[in-house]
Image (cartoon, helix red, strand yellow):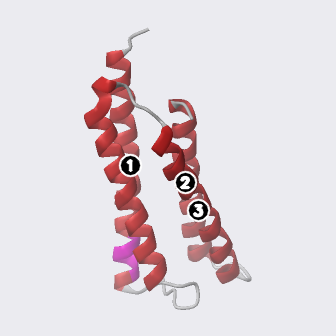
Amino acid sequence: MDFEDLKARVIELRETQQSIASVVQDQPPDWRKEVVRLRLELSRKLGFVSNSTNDWQAHASASAAWSRFRKNLSVLRAALAEHQARWSAVALDERATDFQASTRRIRKAFDDLEQGLAELQLAASRSNPT
Protein backbone atom coordinates (compact mmCIF):
# COMPACT_ATOMS: atom_id res chain seq x y z
CA MET A 1 0.00 0.00 0.00
CA ASP A 2 1.49 3.34 -1.00
CA PHE A 3 0.70 6.67 0.62
CA GLU A 4 -2.14 7.53 -1.77
CA ASP A 5 -3.77 4.15 -1.07
CA LEU A 6 -3.44 4.78 2.66
CA LYS A 7 -4.98 8.22 2.29
CA ALA A 8 -7.88 6.81 0.23
CA ARG A 9 -8.51 4.11 2.84
CA VAL A 10 -8.59 6.67 5.67
CA ILE A 11 -11.08 8.74 3.67
CA GLU A 12 -13.23 5.61 3.19
CA LEU A 13 -13.14 5.00 6.94
CA ARG A 14 -14.37 8.52 7.65
CA GLU A 15 -17.09 8.24 5.01
CA THR A 16 -18.34 4.97 6.50
CA GLN A 17 -18.46 6.53 9.97
CA GLN A 18 -20.35 9.51 8.55
CA SER A 19 -22.82 7.09 6.94
CA ILE A 20 -23.41 5.50 10.33
CA ALA A 21 -24.03 8.92 11.87
CA SER A 22 -26.51 9.78 9.11
CA VAL A 23 -28.43 6.54 9.58
CA VAL A 24 -28.63 7.10 13.33
CA GLN A 25 -29.82 10.66 12.83
CA ASP A 26 -32.36 9.93 10.07
CA GLN A 27 -33.54 6.55 11.41
CA PRO A 28 -34.95 5.10 8.19
CA PRO A 29 -36.84 1.78 8.32
CA ASP A 30 -34.61 -1.00 9.68
CA TRP A 31 -32.02 1.59 10.67
CA ARG A 32 -30.61 -0.55 13.47
CA LYS A 33 -29.84 -3.35 11.00
CA GLU A 34 -28.17 -0.81 8.76
CA VAL A 35 -26.06 0.43 11.69
CA VAL A 36 -24.92 -3.14 12.31
CA ARG A 37 -24.06 -3.63 8.63
CA LEU A 38 -22.14 -0.35 8.46
CA ARG A 39 -20.29 -1.09 11.70
CA LEU A 40 -19.16 -4.41 10.26
CA GLU A 41 -18.01 -2.62 7.12
CA LEU A 42 -16.17 -0.05 9.22
CA SER A 43 -14.51 -2.77 11.26
CA ARG A 44 -13.39 -4.59 8.12
CA LYS A 45 -11.96 -1.40 6.61
CA LEU A 46 -10.24 -0.42 9.84
CA GLY A 47 -8.69 -3.86 10.12
CA PHE A 48 -7.45 -3.61 6.55
CA VAL A 49 -5.83 -0.23 7.20
CA SER A 50 -4.26 -1.47 10.43
CA ASN A 51 -2.90 -4.63 8.84
CA SER A 52 -1.66 -2.80 5.75
CA THR A 53 0.20 -0.19 7.76
CA ASN A 54 2.10 -2.93 9.57
CA ASP A 55 3.95 -3.57 6.31
CA TRP A 56 4.12 0.00 5.03
CA GLN A 57 7.46 1.67 5.56
CA ALA A 58 7.47 5.44 5.98
CA HIS A 59 10.53 7.42 5.02
CA ALA A 60 13.15 7.32 7.76
CA SER A 61 12.93 11.07 8.25
CA ALA A 62 9.16 10.77 8.71
CA SER A 63 9.45 8.28 11.56
CA ALA A 64 8.13 10.69 14.22
CA ALA A 65 5.13 11.52 12.03
CA TRP A 66 4.66 7.81 11.32
CA SER A 67 4.66 7.04 15.04
CA ARG A 68 2.03 9.73 15.66
CA PHE A 69 -0.11 8.38 12.83
CA ARG A 70 0.07 4.83 14.24
CA LYS A 71 -0.78 6.15 17.72
CA ASN A 72 -3.75 8.07 16.31
CA LEU A 73 -4.91 4.93 14.51
CA SER A 74 -4.76 3.01 17.80
CA VAL A 75 -6.73 5.75 19.58
CA LEU A 76 -9.39 5.60 16.87
CA ARG A 77 -9.63 1.81 17.12
CA ALA A 78 -10.04 2.06 20.90
CA ALA A 79 -12.66 4.83 20.67
CA LEU A 80 -14.69 2.85 18.14
CA ALA A 81 -14.44 -0.38 20.14
CA GLU A 82 -15.52 1.36 23.35
CA HIS A 83 -18.38 3.12 21.60
CA GLN A 84 -19.69 -0.01 19.93
CA ALA A 85 -19.39 -2.05 23.13
CA ARG A 86 -21.32 0.56 25.10
CA TRP A 87 -23.83 1.44 22.39
CA SER A 88 -25.00 -1.71 20.66
CA ALA A 89 -27.51 -1.15 17.88
CA VAL A 90 -30.26 -2.21 20.29
CA ALA A 91 -29.17 0.10 23.13
CA LEU A 92 -28.33 3.04 20.90
CA ASP A 93 -29.90 6.30 22.08
CA GLU A 94 -28.63 9.26 20.09
CA ARG A 95 -30.15 11.70 22.61
CA ALA A 96 -28.18 10.35 25.57
CA THR A 97 -25.44 12.63 26.84
CA ASP A 98 -23.00 9.72 27.10
CA PHE A 99 -23.72 8.71 23.51
CA GLN A 100 -23.10 12.24 22.28
CA ALA A 101 -19.82 12.44 24.22
CA SER A 102 -18.75 9.12 22.75
CA THR A 103 -19.48 10.26 19.19
CA ARG A 104 -17.49 13.46 19.83
CA ARG A 105 -14.51 11.31 20.89
CA ILE A 106 -14.81 9.34 17.67
CA ARG A 107 -14.97 12.50 15.55
CA LYS A 108 -11.89 13.87 17.35
CA ALA A 109 -10.07 10.57 16.83
CA PHE A 110 -10.84 10.77 13.10
CA ASP A 111 -9.72 14.41 13.01
CA ASP A 112 -6.46 13.47 14.74
CA LEU A 113 -5.91 10.54 12.36
CA GLU A 114 -6.41 12.77 9.33
CA GLN A 115 -4.10 15.41 10.84
CA GLY A 116 -1.49 12.72 11.44
CA LEU A 117 -1.85 11.60 7.84
CA ALA A 118 -1.28 15.17 6.62
CA GLU A 119 1.81 15.45 8.85
CA LEU A 120 3.09 12.15 7.51
CA GLN A 121 2.62 13.33 3.94
CA LEU A 122 4.43 16.59 4.69
CA ALA A 123 7.33 14.82 6.40
CA ALA A 124 7.64 12.35 3.54
CA SER A 125 7.59 15.12 0.93
CA ARG A 126 10.34 17.00 2.78
CA SER A 127 12.54 13.94 2.80
CA ASN A 128 11.89 13.13 -0.85
CA PRO A 129 11.25 16.34 -2.84
CA THR A 130 10.32 15.79 -6.46
Q: Is residue 126 above or below residue 113?
A: above
Q: Is residue 112 visible?
A: no
Quadrant containing the C terminus is: top left
**Front-most of 60 and 68?**
60
Residue 105 placement: quadrant: bottom left
Farthest residue, direction left: 64
Query: Which numbered disc flags the more N-terminal residue, 1 or 3?
Result: 3
Farthest residue, direction front: 55
The disc label shown at residue 113, or none: 1
Task: Please state the horizontal and vertical placement of residue 127, each as a whole percent of the image.
Answer: 33, 17
The magenta-colored residue range is 99-103
Query: Which numbered disc flags the more N-terminal residue, 3 or 2?
Result: 2
**Front-most of 115 and 96?**
115
Farthest residue, direction top: 130
Assign the magenta stretch its main secondary structure: helix
Label 1 – label 3 distance at C-alpha:
15 Å
Q: Residues within 10 Å of mark 1 (few under 14, many from 20)?
A: many
* Residue labelled with disc 3: 42
Q: Residues within 10 Å of mark 2 (few under 14, many from 20)?
A: many
Q: Amino acid at mark 1?
A: Leu
Label 3 – label 2 distance at C-alpha:
6 Å
Residue 109 placement: quadrant: bottom left
Say if mark 1 contacts mark 2, CB within 8 Å: yes
* Residue labelled with disc 2: 13
Query: Which numbered disc flags the more N-terminal residue, 1 or 2?
Result: 2
| Horizontal side, residue 99 vs residue 71: left or right | right
Residue 115 placement: quadrant: top left
Q: Residues within 10 Å of mark 3 (few under 14, many from 20)?
A: many
